[in-house]
């Protein structure tokens, strides 16, 4: 079933704005030229919702308020649209849906996943933001981005490379390397020749952080490190939710 609804939070993008601001009292988000990050966490009510902050840190604002479980948020290449999964709970048979939230209009589009489609494991956009790829435990699917009609189309063998590209965490301006989970845990980077280097033994959930950095979680901390020489830094949050994870970055 497809439908547009008002999002649980009013999201407004001001073209003339020079910076992002997040106002918890009005649940208003004004996205300007500053980079920002969306991630999953547990709110004070114990529900699993989405949260947003500037990439530089500071106050965290709750983006969604639902009694459902929300997971795997992924921002479109231009940062204007957010796709994520929503389910009633985390059990294997729980009904699930793909939600596409337009950050310009604060509306949501919902595509209910078929019964038996499996557990979501990955979500990603193609490079021009016209398609969303879904990886479930039963297979990989493609959905057209709004305003095109949404329909789950099974990815064939000829499209697997495009799907893997959309679902991967590619690093650098030329996207020359991929961040992956190490076989024994932690975060690794696989280079263009297939060589793998461990960069964060205690890390999890790696994400692309602009053209020149990578980020990951270590416990409740979000760590950012440049791809060149230098040390890692921790993003300093205020009012962060419990168990932050599964982040997506929008910026240069």
Image (spheres, rainbow, N blue to C red):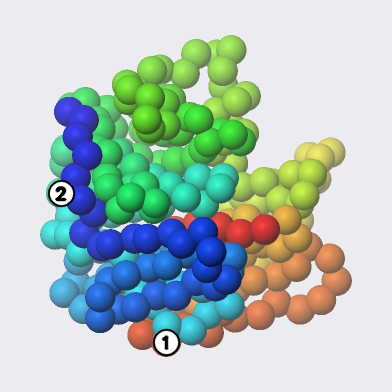
Indicate the position of residue 229 as horizontal and vertical percent values: 85, 71
Quarter of the image with the N terminus is top left
Indicate the position of residue 57 as horizontal and vertical percent values: 53, 80
Residue at the image position 46 percent from the left and 62 percent from the top: 14
Number of other residues with Cα within 10 Å of mark 2, as a class: few under 14, some 14 to 19, many 20 or more: some
Q: Is residue 195 left or right of residue 224?
A: right
Which label belongs to residue 238? 1
Whether residue 105 is visible, yes or no, is yes
Q: Is residue 244 left or right of residue 189?
A: left
Indicate the position of residue 76 as horizontal and vertical percent values: 50, 45
Give the SS element for disc 2: loop
Quarter of the image for residue 213 reads bottom right
Residue at the image position 50 percent from the left and 71 percent from the top: 20
Residue at the image position 25 percent from the left and 75 percent from the top: 26
Residue at the image position 70 percent from the left and 70 percent from the top: 225
Q: Is residue 239 above or below residue 38?
A: below
Quarter of the image with the C terminus is bottom right
State how far apart marks 1 and 2 are (Cα).
29 Å
């Amino acid at each position: 079933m497809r439908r547009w609804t008002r999002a649980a939070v009013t999201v407004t993008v001001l073209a003339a704005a020079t910076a992002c601001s997040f106002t918890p009292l009005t649940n208003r988000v004004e996205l300007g030229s500053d980079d920002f990050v969306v991630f999953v966490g547990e709110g004070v009510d114990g529900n699993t919702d989405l949260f947003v902050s500037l990439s530089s840190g500071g106050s965290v604002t709750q983006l969604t308020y639902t009694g459902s479980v929300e997971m795997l948020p992924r921002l479109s290449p231009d940062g204007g649209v957010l796709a994520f999964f929503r389910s009633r709970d985390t059990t294997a048979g729980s009904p699930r849906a793909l939600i596409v939230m337009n950050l310009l209009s604060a509306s949501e589009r919902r595509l209910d996943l078929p019964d038996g489609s499996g557990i979501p494991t990955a979500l990603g956009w193609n490079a021009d933001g016209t398609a969303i790829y879904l990886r479930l435990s039963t297979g990989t699917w493609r959905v057209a981005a709004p305003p095109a009609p949404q329909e789950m189309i099974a990815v064939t063998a000829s499209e697997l490379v495009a799907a893997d590209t959309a679902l991967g965490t590619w690093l650098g301006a030329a996207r020359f390397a991929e961040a992956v989970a190490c076989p024994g845990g932690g975060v690794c980077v696989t280079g263009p020749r297939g060589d793998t280097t461990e960069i964060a033994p205690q890390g999890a959930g790696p994400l692309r952080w602009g053209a020149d950095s990578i980020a990951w979680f270590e416990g409740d901390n979000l760590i950012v490190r440049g791809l060149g020489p230098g040390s890692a830094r921790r993003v300093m949050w205020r009012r962060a939710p419990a168990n932050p994870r599964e982040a997506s970055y929008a910026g240069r």
